[in-house]
Amino acid sequence: MLFKTLRKKEFRNFVELLLANTEVIAPKQIGVNEKGKPIHHYLPVRKFEEIDLDYEITEYSAKSYFLPFRENLSSCHFEDD
């Protein structure tokens, strides 16, 4: 397997290229807890600046975004005749 290391500027360009055509999920600060530590979640971002690359830990794993706790598999609508 080949690995590629990107410099910070190259990484920014790469993410901006992805943002132009696809939905990007990244760690995003959503608030601050009672101790003053930032709270992060994996969420869709629209700009590179929304991504917090200095996060230590997210409140939930990325799995909680990609495999939600509850999901509608189907829905039906009935009309009276």
Image (tube, rainbow, N blue to C red):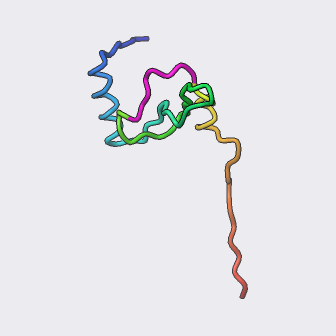
The picture quadrant where one finds residue 5 is top left
> Does residue 19 appear to the left or right of 56 in the view shown?
left
**Quarter in which the N terminus is drawn:** top left
Majority secondary structure of magenta residues: loop
**Quarter in which the C terminus is drawn:** bottom right
Q: How many marks?
A: 0
Pick the front one: 47 or 3? 47
Residue range (magenta): 50-57
Pick the front one: 51 or 23? 51
Residue farthest bottom in this picture: 81
At horizontal 35% and vertical 33% (from top left) the residue drawn is 48
Pick the front one: 48 or 1? 48
Where is residue 41 drawn, in percent x and y? 55, 33
Where is residue 27 drawn, in percent x and y? 49, 30
At horizontal 67% and vertical 53% (from top left) the residue drawn is 72
> Does residue 65 appear to the left or right of 14 in the view shown?
right
Residue farthest front in this picture: 35
Does 20 sit above or below residue 27?
A: below
At horizontal 43% and vertical 41% (from top left) the residue drawn is 23
Where is residue 3 drawn, in percent x and y? 39, 12
Magenta stretch containing residue 13, yes or no? no
> Does residue 45 appear to the left or right of 6 in the view shown?
right
The picture quadrant where one finds residue 32 is top right
Does 61 sit above or below residue 75?
A: above
Magenta stretch containing residue 56, yes or no? yes
Does 81 sit above or below residue 35?
A: below
